[in-house]
Image: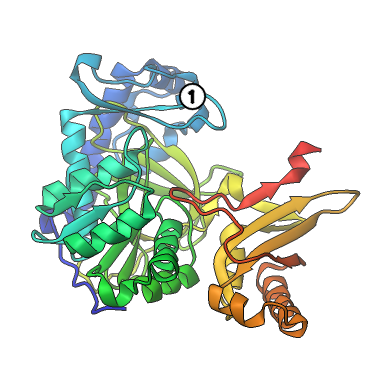
Amino acid sequence: MKDSAESWIFQPEFEKMPRSKLVQLQEERLRKIVKYCYDKVPVYRTKFKHAGITPDDVKTLDDLEKIPFTEKEDLRKAYPYGMLAADLSDVLELHASSGTTGHPTTCAYTKSDLEVWSKVMARIYASAGTRKGDIVQNAYGYGLFTGGLGFHYGALEIGATVLPIAAGETERQISLAKEYGTTVLTCTPSYAAFMGRYAKEKMGIDPAKELKWKSGLFGAEAWSEELRERIEELLGLEAFDIYGLSEVIGPGVSVECAEHDGLHIEEDHFLPEIINPKTGERCKEGETGELVLTTLTRQATPVLRFRTGDTTAFKFDECVCGRASLRMDRIFGRADDMLKVRGVKFWPKTVEHALLRVDGASENYEIVIDRPEELDVMTLRLEPSKECYESVKGDLSKLQALVKEIDEHVKSIVGVKANVELVPYGSLPRFMGKAKRIRDLRKQR
């Protein structure tokens, strides 16, 4: 890894705000946004009526629990404009989710929303040491997906130069990185790893030595500490985890600082809670649960107590970076992504955690789950690294040893026996956006 990217604070007046003043600001903004949602969004008036409350009942952070949750299904049912709180004539930008599990959801932005988005994204960049003079290679997807434009706006706000290349065209990505001397990379972690492998194996370029990337901001999918280490080794940069979601703002909710000990939440704009996903009750301090977010400053499509479906925990101790905001652990996974095989529950990221501890295992894998008869069967299809593949190809004893080591790690860490299947290097699909690692064939039976 290259020298650590020195982080700095873009808006210290907010990011270093004492907790007592922050709570005062949060409660002031909470009262305003609750009344705003009640007055402007019929969905919230109905929810409040069913809960037997009015905006006057919400005065402090302790009153937040009185407000009913907002579910993604609420947003789907209200598509396209049912959750819109601003006049459509004041909306400058519209984004929509993919709608792969139902109707899509609408995410709208007024001028004020775009300004807030730019500011929180500038904070994200500053955490990774980005400054005026840096050249940001933005390889997130542009379009209806909020990733590309969110990172674009933040880079402009901080005064950096943007190369808006979007995802894909990997050879061109590497060539332009070298020719333009880009210094910051933004994309999904799986695509970052793929670019590193592609540069070395297809183009004969060692990114860690020949490119100028000093830091990378990676998100949009859950990823392990082991994958971070792989990316940093491949690309020679410092990798930062970021978090956001379209229903709340897009990217920009939280980010790691240079300490890499949790993600700082932009609490002056997003009010966070952790709840038990089964009971809906707030978790005790330090417990893992589902992240719930309330937008405090969103105008076009604000949400109250939105259940993200993402599982994490909060860190309450002070961070040496100087930011006073609450921190969250990196996302363990989505509650609805959790797998259950033979009674054992686990997140796909746990499999990646186990795999990448094995020397010779690559980050390219696929989890296939089936139930041919009465019992679940999990098959782990895995590519060895290119070096490993070429060294053990045709050597049955070495292949068996690698399979055994992977099997033992997965069983020990995940708690589930997997049928490990080594496949030829380069045979599994590569992903430019969010990686799709799971094939659950039980749903097709």
Q: Secondary structure at mark 1?
A: helix
Going 27% across and 36% down the picture, which residue do you hit? 30
Location of residue 281 in the rendering, given as x and y in whole percent from the top left corner: 53, 45
Q: Which residue is mark 1?
A: 76
Q: Is residue 372 left or right of residue 114?
A: right
Q: Tell me where residue 427 appears, x and y as whole percent.
A: 61, 59
Residues 396 and 85: in front is: 396
Residue shown at 19% from the left, 43% from the top: 153
State the colouring used for the structure image.
rainbow
Q: Residue furthest right?
A: 373
Report the front residue among 208 and 378: 208
For the question of whether residue 255 can be seen, the reply is no
Q: Residues within 10 Å of mark 1 (few under 14, many from 20)?
A: some
Q: How many marks?
A: 1
Q: Position of residue 377 (x, y in %)?
A: 80, 56
Residue type, label 1:
Arg
On the picture, is 83 further left or further right than 2? right
Residue 353 image point, x, y percent: 56, 69
| Image quarter in which the N terminus is found | bottom left
Front residue (pair 168, 439): 168
Residue 247 image-quadrant placement: top left
Compared with residue 111, is residue 393 higher up or lower down, i.e. above or below? below
Q: Residue at x 36, y 47 (%)?
A: 167
Q: Quadrant of the C terminus?
A: top right
Is residue 55 among what the camera can see? yes
Classify residue 408 as left or right of residue 387.
right
